[in-house]
C-alpha cells in the first residue's frame, strides 16, 4: 500500500510536470484527488490494515495528497501567468501612433507678461489696483499735474467722449484715485495694470489700444535710490540676472526728477548692435520721484510724504523678450501667434 | 534739434572728444541723442578749382569743355551743368577721387574728348537735395571768390561735420539753441563757454525817426524791439553760414533770411525781417486780430484770423502772424534795400493757438510756444544787426525802437544739501554741490548747508526744489546713485479675492481648451449693437461713442466682446485657420444715459467662441465638430467649478440662431447667453457654424464673495431611480426637471437626463426623455417605501403638468 501511494505520487507529479494547459491540470486534479480517484481508493482499503499501520498509511496518503495539490497549484500559477502573457501579447498596439488630441488652451502673451510683472511686485510688497478705462479729465490729467491747456495733453492725442470724459491715456489715474481714497492717511505701494488708449494710427510700432503697468510707492523718506533698487530688482527678475540697468534723466509732468530706464542689450551684451541701435542699451520704462503737486492734489502733504512712480509697456517688454516684431500681433489674435506663447 | 558739432566748436572746445563719446555723455546727463549723422560720407581728392576756360563741347550741345586750374596742375574736364561758366571757383573731383556711394572718378572719354575729373554739385558731394539752395539744385556749386584754388573742398563745405540729433523733452526747450546746447555741454564736460559778440556799429541816424512801436496787449507781447538796417545788399550769405544752416536742416535762401535763421538757431530766438519799404507805414502796431480779418502769409495762403491770434500790423493791415509767419506783402526780396528787423517775446499760448489753428508749425513757432529766454530777445536782435552789417552791407540805424514790459527776473530756489541727500539717497558734500552749480553756470549764495540759487532765465524749467534735485542728480550722475530698497514698514502684497477669481476664470477656460484673446474695446457703431446680451441691452440706452474717432471702425465702445472676437475668427479663417476656440475676459461699457455725462459702467464679462473641428483623431476616423452642447459643456463646467447653479432658457435674440440659443439665469437674474451665431451673420463673417457664450462675471463675483462652507461627505448610501417619459417634443428638459424637483421632495439630491429619443418607435411630435433621480439623506439610511412614495408623486406630477406618459 505504501508503495502504491508513492507510485501514485510520482506518477501524478510526472503528469503535472508534463501538462501544458489549465484543463490538463484540472483533469489530473480530478483523476488523482477526486472522490473516485486512486488515493481515495487506497484509503478505502485501509480497513484491512492493522491498527498500527493505519495511521502511518493515513498520514502518508495525506502527505501524497498535499504534495500533488502543491504541485498542481504551482503549475497552475505558471500556466496562468503564461496564458496572461500570451493574451497580452495579442493586445499589443503601435504605441507610436498619435493619441486622441485634447484641446490645449492658454493665456494671451500680454496676460502672461502682466501677471509675471504683478507677481514680481507682489513679491516686493506691492498691491494691485485697477480703475476705469473711461476716465474723467481730472484724474487722467489734472490730478497728475497736467492742467487744462498744458501742451503735453493735446486734444489730438486722446480719445475724448465728452469735454470731461475720455479713454484713459495711461493707468496713472488709478494712482491718483488710490491716493485720493487713502487721503494722505497711509503709505501707498501699488501697481496698476490695464488697457490704455491713444490717438495713434495702428502700425508695426503703434497701437491705438495698448497695455500699461504703472507703479507707485508713497511713504515718508522715499529716496530716488529706492526707485533705482526696486527697478533693478524688477529688471533682473524679468530679464535675467546678467542684465544691467541704467537710469537717464527725462521728463514727465507728474514726476521730478524724472528718469528713463535702459537695460543692457541681451543680443550684444552691451557692445552695440542693430537691436539697440548701437548703444548697447534698450529703453524699457519711465519713472521718477512723484511731483509734489501730484501729492498735494491727492491729499498727501509733500513736506511729510514723497515717493516714486514708474510705468512700463508690456507690449514692449514682450517684443523685447520674445522678439515679437509687430505690435498688431497682440490684437489680431492670429491663432498661430496665440499658440506660440503657452507658459511651460 | 540738429546740432552741428563744427558749429558748436565756436562756443566750446570739444576738439578732443569724439561725436559718439559726446553723444553718450549728453544722453546720460539728460538730453537723449537720438542719432549721429555725418553731413556726407568722406570724399577724397576733391579740391577747389578755377575755371580758366569754358567752351562748348565740339560734339555735344549740352556739354562744356573746361580747363580747370586745381593748383599744382590744370585739368581738362567735361561738365554738363547748366550754370558752369568761365571764372568760377568750383569743386573738382580729381581722377582717383572717391565720392559718396563709393563713386570712383577716373579719366574718361566723353564723345571723343578726354575728361580728367568731374565738377561736382552739392548732391554729388553727399548733401541731401532738400537742404541744397534752390537755385543750384540742377547745377554745380560755386565757391565764393575768396576760396583758395587747390584747397580741400570737403572741408570748405563742412562735409566733415557730425550732427547730433537731440530728442528734447518739453522741459528742455533751452536746448533749442546752439548756446543752450553749449551751456549743457559745458556743464557735462566742465569746460568754459565763449559767447558770440553782439557789438554793432550804429550810425548817428535814429531808428526812431523811421518807425514807432505800439503794443496793445502786454500780456501777449511783453517785448517788441525794432531795428532798422539800411543799404542792404541782398546776396548769398557767407559759405560757413550756409554750411551750418544746411547741417541744421535749413535751406539757405539769401543773406538776410539766412542771418535771421542763423541767429534763431544760435540764440533760440526767432526774428523776423520785413522789407521796410513794403511795410506800408512807419507805425508798428501789435494787436489781437479782428474776427474774420484776412491776411496772406509768406506761403501765399490766405488766412482767416480771429481775436485769439496776435498780429503785427502797420497800423492798418496785418503784416505778420506774430511768431508764426510773416505776411507776403512785406517779405524780403532781391529788391529789398532797408530791413525792419523784429526781435520780440510773444506769449506761448498766443503762438500755440495761431500755429495750431493754421497748422503752421515752424522753427519759430515751436520756440515761442515753449517760451524763449527773456534775456536773449534783444541780444539776438543786436547779433543779427551785427551780422547784417557785416554780411549784407547793412547800415544799422541808432537805437532799438522798443516796447518793453518783459519780466527778466531769475527764479530763486532754496535748497539744503541734507534734503538733496535725503531725496536722492546719496551723501553729496557741500563742496560737490558748489562744483555742480559752477559747472551749470548758475549763480548762488551759500550759507553753510543752505543754497539760494538764482536760476538763469534760459532755464525756464527750474522753479522748485525738486527741479534742483534733478539738476544736481543729473550732473552728479544718475549712475552714481546707490541701489537701495525702501525702508518703510513693509506690507504683505497680494491679490484681492476678485483678482484671484479673475485668474481662476481664465485658468478654467484655458483648461477647457480655449485660447485667450485680447480684442479692441473700440468697435464700429454697427458692431457695437451686435450680439449684446439681453440684460445688457436692457440697461444700455445707446453705445458710448467717441467725440472725434479716427475711423468708423474704432468709433464706439463695445457692449459685447463677441463682435470683435468674431472678427478675429474671420481673420483666422481667411488665413485657412478654421478650427478655433477662443475666450476673452474683458470690460464692456454700459451707459444708462441718452447723452453721456457720467462715466459708463464698466462691466466685466467673459465671452467665448468655438468653430470648426474640436476633436479630430484622423487615423481612427474620429471627428467632432463644435456644436451647441460642446460649448454648453464648457460653460456648465465653469459654473460647476464655481459651485454656482444656473438655468438655461430658450431665447430668441438678434444675430443668434432662433432655435439654438439659451439665456443663462442665476436664480431669477439673467446673466448671459449661449448659442449658435445666426447663419446669416456667420455668412457675413465668412464663418462656418460658430457657437458662442457671453457671461456677466461681475455678478458671479458678487455671488462668490461668500466663501463656501465645508459640506460633509455623505456616510449613508444613496438610492438611484430612473424614470423614462414620453412627452410632446416642445416640452423642455428643464421644465420636466423642475416639476420633478418640486414633486420629489427634499430627499431628491440630483436629477440628470440620461437619454433623449425621438423616432420610429414613437408617435410623431413626441419624444422620450429619461431622467436619473438620486435620493440621499445625509443623516440616515433611506427606506425603500419613502423613495417609492416620492417616485409616485413625481410620476403623477409629470403626468398632470406635462401629460407625460411612462415609457413602456
Ligand atoms: Zn545690442
Image (spheres, coloured by chain):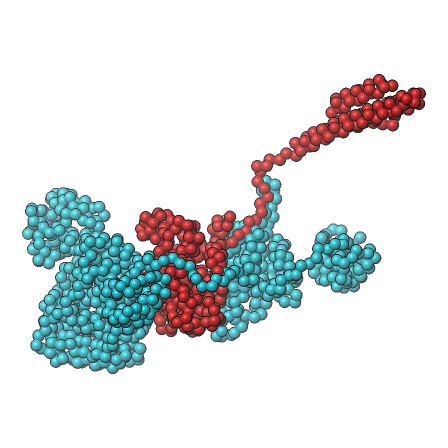
Chain colours: A red, B cyan
Q: Which residue occupies 32% across, 65% down?
A: B470
Image x and y of residue A217, in percent: 44, 64
Q: Is residue B123 among what the camera can see?
A: no
Q: x%, y% of residue B246?
A: 20, 59
Mark yes or no: residue B490 visible: yes
Q: Is residue B500 left or right of residue B432?
A: right
Q: Quadrant of the N terminus of chain B?
A: bottom left
Res B401 → quadrant:
bottom left
Front-most of residues B487 and A234: B487
Q: Nearer the viewer, residue B251 or B785?
A: B785
Percent x, y of residue A247: 35, 58
Residue B137, by quadrant, is bottom left
In this picture, is B505 found above or below A89? below
Q: In the drawing, does residue B707 fall left or right of residue B462?
A: right
User: Which x, y percent locates residue B210?
Assistant: 13, 79
In the current view of this chain or complex, which residue is farthest to the top?
A3
Q: Residue at x 49, y 64 (%)?
A: A129
Residue A60 occupies quadrant: top right
* Residue occupying the point 51% across, 74% down: B594
Tell me which residue sits at (62%, 64%) in the image: B706
Q: In the image, is B258 to the left or to the right of B803?
A: left
| Number of numbered tags placed on the structure image | 0
User: Foreground residue, B753 or A263?
Assistant: A263
Q: Is residue B562 left or right of residue A38?
A: left
Q: Is residue A39 above or below residue B516?
A: above
Along the viewing direction, whichever of B272 and B441 lies nearer the viewer: B441
Amino acid at each position: 500500500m505504501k508503495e502504491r501511494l508513492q507510485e501514485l505520487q510520482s506518477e501524478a507529479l510526472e503528469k503535472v510536470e508534463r501538462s501544458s494547459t489549465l484543463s490538463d491540470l484540472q483533469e489530473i486534479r480530478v483523476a488523482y484527488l477526486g472522490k473516485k480517484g486512486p488515493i481515495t481508493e487506497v484509503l478505502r482499503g485501509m480497513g484491512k490494515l492493522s491498527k498500527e499501520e493505519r495511521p502511518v498509511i493515513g498520514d502518508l496518503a495525506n502527505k501524497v495528497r498535499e504534495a500533488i495539490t502543491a504541485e498542481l497549484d504551482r503549475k497552475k500559477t505558471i500556466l496562468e501567468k503564461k496564458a496572461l502573457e500570451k493574451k497580452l501579447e495579442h493586445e499589443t498596439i503601435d504605441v507610436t501612433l498619435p493619441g486622441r488630441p485634447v484641446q490645449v488652451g492658454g493665456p494671451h502673451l500680454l496676460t502672461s507678461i502682466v501677471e509675471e510683472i504683478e507677481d514680481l511686485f507682489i513679491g516686493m510688497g506691492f498691491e494691485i489696483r485697477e480703475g476705469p478705462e473711461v476716465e474723467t479729465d481730472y484724474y487722467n490729467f489734472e490730478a497728475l499735474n497736467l492742467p487744462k491747456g498744458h501742451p503735453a495733453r493735446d486734444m489730438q492725442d486722446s480719445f475724448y467722449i465728452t469735454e470731461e470724459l475720455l479713454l484713459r491715456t495711461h493707468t496713472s489715474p488709478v494712482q491718483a484715485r488710490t491716493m485720493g481714497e487713502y487721503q494722505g492717511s497711509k503709505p501707498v505701494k501699488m501697481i496698476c495694470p490695464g488697457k490704455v488708449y491713444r490717438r495713434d494710427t495702428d502700425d508695426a510700432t503703434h497701437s491705438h489700444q495698448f497695455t500699461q503697468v504703472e507703479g507707485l510707492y508713497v511713504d515718508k523718506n522715499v529716496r530716488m535710490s529706492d526707485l533705482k533698487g526696486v527697478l533693478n530688482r524688477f529688471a533682473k527678475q524679468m530679464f535675467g540676472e546678467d542684465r544691467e540697468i541704467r537710469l537717464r534723466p527725462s521728463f514727465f509732468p507728474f514726476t521730478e526728477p524724472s528718469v528713463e530706464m535702459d537695460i543692457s542689450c541681451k543680443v550684444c551684451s552691451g557692445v552695440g548692435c542693430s537691436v539697440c541701435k548701437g548703444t548697447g542699451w534698450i529703453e524699457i520704462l519711465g519713472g521718477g520721484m512723484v511731483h509734489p503737486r501730484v501729492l498735494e492734489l491727492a491729499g498727501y502733504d509733500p513736506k511729510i510724504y514723497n515717493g516714486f512712480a514708474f510705468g512700463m509697456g508690456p507690449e514692449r517688454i514682450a517684443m523685447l523678450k520674445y522678439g515679437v516684431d509687430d505690435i498688431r500681433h497682440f490684437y489680431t489674435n492670429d491663432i498661430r501667434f496665440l499658440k506660440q506663447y503657452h507658459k511651460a | 534739434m540738429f546740432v552741428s558739432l563744427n558749429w558748436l566748436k565756436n562756443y566750446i572746445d570739444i576738439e578732443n572728444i569724439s561725436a559718439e563719446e559726446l553723444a553718450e555723455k549728453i544722453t546720460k546727463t539728460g538730453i537723449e541723442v537720438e542719432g549721429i549723422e555725418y553731413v556726407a560720407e568722406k570724399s577724397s581728392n576733391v579740391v577747389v578749382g578755377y575755371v580758366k576756360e569754358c567752351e562748348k563741347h565740339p560734339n555735344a550741345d549740352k556739354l562744356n569743355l573746361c580747363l580747370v586750374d586745381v593748383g599744382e596742375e590744370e585739368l581738362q574736364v567735361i561738365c554738363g551743368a547748366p550754370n558752369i561758366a568761365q571764372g568760377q571757383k568750383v569743386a573738382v573731383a580729381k581722377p582717383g577721387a572717391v565720392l559718396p556711394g563709393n563713386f570712383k572718378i577716373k579719366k574718361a572719354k566723353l564723345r571723343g574728348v578726354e575728361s580728367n575729373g568731374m565738377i561736382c554739385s552739392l548732391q554729388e558731394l553727399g548733401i541731401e537735395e532738400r537742404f541744397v539752395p534752390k537755385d543750384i539744385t540742377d547745377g554745380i556749386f560755386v565757391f565764393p571768390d575768396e576760396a583758395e584754388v587747390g584747397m580741400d573742398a570737403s572741408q570748405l563745405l563742412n562735409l566733415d561735420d557730425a550732427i547730433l540729433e537731440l530728442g528734447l523733452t518739453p522741459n528742455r526747450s533751452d536746448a533749442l539753441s546752439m548756446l543752450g546746447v553749449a551751456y549743457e555741454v559745458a556743464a557735462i564736460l566742465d569746460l568754459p563757454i565763449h559767447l558770440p559778440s553782439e557789438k554793432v556799429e550804429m550810425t548817428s541816424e535814429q531808428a526812431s525817426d523811421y518807425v514807432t512801436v505800439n503794443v496793445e496787449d502786454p500780456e501777449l507781447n511783453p517785448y517788441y524791439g525794432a531795428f532798422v538796417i539800411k543799404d542792404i545788399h541782398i546776396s548769398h550769405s557767407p559759405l560757413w553760414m550756409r554750411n551750418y544752416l544746411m547741417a541744421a536742416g535749413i535751406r539757405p535762401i539769401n543773406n538776410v533770411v539766412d542771418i535771421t535763421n542763423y541767429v534763431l538757431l544760435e540764440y533760440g530766438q526767432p526774428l523776423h525781417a520785413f522789407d521796410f519799404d513794403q511795410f506800408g507805414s512807419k507805425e508798428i502796431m501789435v494787436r489781437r486780430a479782428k474776427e474774420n480779418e484776412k491776411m496772406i502769409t509768406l506761403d501765399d495762403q490766405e488766412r482767416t484770423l480771429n481775436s485769439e491770434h496776435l498780429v503785427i500790423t502797420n497800423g492798418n493791415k496785418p503784416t505778420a502772424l506774430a511768431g508764426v509767419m510773416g505776411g507776403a506783402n512785406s517779405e524780403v526780396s532781391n529788391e529789398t534795400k532797408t530791413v525792419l528787423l523784429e526781435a520780440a517775446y510773444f506769449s506761448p499760448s498766443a503762438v500755440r493757438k495761431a500755429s495750431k489753428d493754421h497748422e503752421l508749425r515752424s522753427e519759430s513757432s515751436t520756440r515761442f510756444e515753449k517760451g524763449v529766454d527773456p534775456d536773449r530777445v534783444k541780444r539776438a536782435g543786436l547779433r543779427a544787426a551785427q551780422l547784417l552789417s557785416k554780411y549784407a552791407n547793412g547800415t544799422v540805424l541808432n537805437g532799438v525802437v522798443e516796447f518793453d514790459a518783459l519780466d527778466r527776473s531769475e527764479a530763486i530756489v532754496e535748497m539744503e544739501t541734507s534734503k538733496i541727500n535725503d531725496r536722492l539717497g546719496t551723501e553729496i558734500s557741500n563742496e560737490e554741490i558748489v562744483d555742480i552749480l559752477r559747472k551749470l553756470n548758475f549763480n548762488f549764495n551759500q550759507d553753510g548747508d543752505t543754497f539760494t540759487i538764482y536760476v538763469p532765465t534760459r532755464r525756464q524749467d527750474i522753479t522748485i526744489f525738486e527741479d534742483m534735485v534733478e539738476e544736481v542728480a543729473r550732473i552728479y550722475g544718475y549712475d552714481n546713485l546707490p541701489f537701495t530698497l525702501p525702508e518703510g514698514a513693509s506690507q504683505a502684497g497680494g491679490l484681492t479675492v476678485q483678482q484671484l477669481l479673475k485668474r481662476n476664470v481664465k485658468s478654467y477656460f484655458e483648461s477647457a481648451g480655449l485660447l485667450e484673446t485680447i480684442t479692441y474695446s473700440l468697435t464700429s457703431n454697427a458692431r457695437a449693437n451686435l450680439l449684446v446680451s439681453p440684460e445688457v441691452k436692457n440697461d444700455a440706452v445707446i453705445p458710448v461713442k467717441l467725440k472725434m474717432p479716427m475711423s468708423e471702425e474704432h468709433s464706439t465702445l463695445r457692449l459685447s466682446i463677441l463682435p470683435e472676437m468674431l472678427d478675429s475668427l474671420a481673420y483666422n479663417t481667411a488665413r485657412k485657420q478654421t478650427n478655433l476656440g477662443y475666450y476673452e475676459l474683458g470690460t464692456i461699457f454700459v451707459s444708462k444715459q441718452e447723452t453721456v455725462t457720467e462715466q459708463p459702467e464698466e462691466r466685466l464679462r467673459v465671452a467665448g467662441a468655438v468653430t470648426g473641428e474640436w476633436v479630430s483623431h484622423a487615423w481612427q476616423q474620429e471627428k467632432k465638430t463644435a456644436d451647441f452642447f460642446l460649448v454648453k459643456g464648457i460653460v456648465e463646467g465653469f459654473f460647476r467649478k464655481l459651485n454656482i447653479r444656473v438655468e438655461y432658457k430658450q431665447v430668441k435674440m438678434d444675430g443668434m440662431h432662433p432655435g439654438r440659443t439659451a439665456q443663462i439665469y442665476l436664480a431669477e437674474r439673467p446673466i448671459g447667453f449661449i448659442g449658435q451665431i445666426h447663419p446669416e451673420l456667420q455668412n457675413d463673417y465668412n464663418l462656418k457654424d460658430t457657437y458662442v457664450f457671453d457671461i456677466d462675471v461681475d455678478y458671479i463675483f458678487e455671488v462668490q464673495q461668500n466663501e463656501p462652507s465645508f459640506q460633509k461627505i455623505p456616510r449613508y448610501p444613496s438610492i438611484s431611480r430612473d424614470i423614462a417619459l414620453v412627452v410632446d417634443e416642445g416640452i423642455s428638459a428643464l421644465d420636466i426637471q423642475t416639476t420633478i424637483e418640486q414633486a420629489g421632495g427634499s430627499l431628491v439630491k440630483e436629477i440628470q437626463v440620461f437619454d433623449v429619443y425621438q423616432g420610429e418607435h414613437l408617435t410623431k411630435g413626441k419624444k422620450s426623455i429619461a431622467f436619473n433621480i438620486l435620493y440621499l439623506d445625509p443623516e440616515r439610511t433611506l427606506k425603500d417605501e419613502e423613495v417609492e412614495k416620492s417616485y409616485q408623486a413625481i410620476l403623477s406630477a409629470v403626468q398632470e403638468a406635462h401629460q407625460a406618459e411612462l415609457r413602456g
